Amino acid sequence: MRVINMLLIGAGLVAALPAANQPATTDVIEHHVQHPNGTVVSVFEMRPRISAPPTTTPVNNPRRAVNWFVMSKWDKKYGMCGATTWDPKTGTRSPLISDCVAVAAHVADSATGYYAVRGFGDDAGTFQGLLYSGSCYFGIRPKTAADAGITYAWYIGTQDIQDLIRDSISQFGKKGRVSVEGDMSCKNDESVMDVHWGIYGY
């Protein structure tokens, strides 16, 4: 059974999590997930508030907002994106595959739905982290910084995330680690946008 807790951002939490990804205005949701190896691990969702004041933190600018939308199991929106390019970056400091498997396990176990990220501005060249476990982060951003103003939000579905993590591990995982980025077109009801995604670590 998944246990979901809202975490209060305080000194203790900030000390426990990578500082580069935890500005004080970020909401973090912890999910306890059954890992395929039989252990229970924590997977975190990051949901910055759109109304927070500016910050110099580059990765999760609190001007951004991450919204999660639950769809019915018959709705196709959980798979919103087409074919992707692949830019493998796996090296000795890349995220552990076991941590990325935990992220994928949470997504597979969660409700069918999609993420919408809005508020990209001058910092549109940095990822907005959506999910992480241990060393493994999954995030998205506009394909180029110049694209930031062309659409209201940037979308990705749960099935897209599952597929990208699975295929990244199978194609580019090396010595227990994986790191990949790519570009794909994603569509909501009103527009098509080019999304840059990444599996990365800190």
Image (cartoon, grey):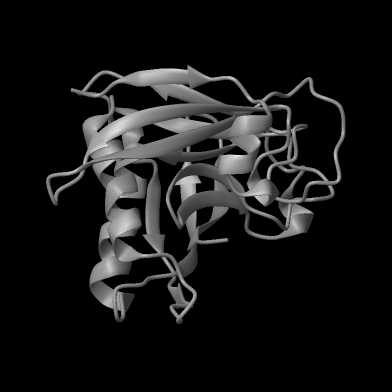
Residue 107 as seen in the image, left or right of residue 56: left
Q: Position of residue 31 (x, y in %)?
A: 36, 29
Quadrant of the image for the N terminus?
top left
Residue 190 percent across, percent down from the top left = 54, 30
> Which residue is rendered at x = 57% and y = 54% of the image?
194
In the displayed structure, does residue 23 sit left or right of residue 168?
right
Position of 105 relative to 177 (above/below): above
In the rendered image, is residue 65 in sight? no
Q: Where's the C terminus, which quadrant?
A: bottom right
Q: Is residue 137 left or right of residue 153?
A: left
Report which quarter residue 4 is drawn in: top left
Classify 29 as above or below 143: above
Q: Is residue 37 above or below residue 91?
A: above
Residue 66: image x %, image y %? 59, 30
Seen at 69% across and 55% down, the residue is: 126
Residue 170 appears in view: yes
Foreground residue among 187 and 71: 71
Task: Please name the residue shown 32% across and 77% down the image.
Answer: 172
- Tell me the residue at 49%/67% (across/down): 181
Count of numbered marks:
0
Q: Is residue 33 left or right of residue 18?
A: left
Residue 123 position, x and y percent, is: 79, 50
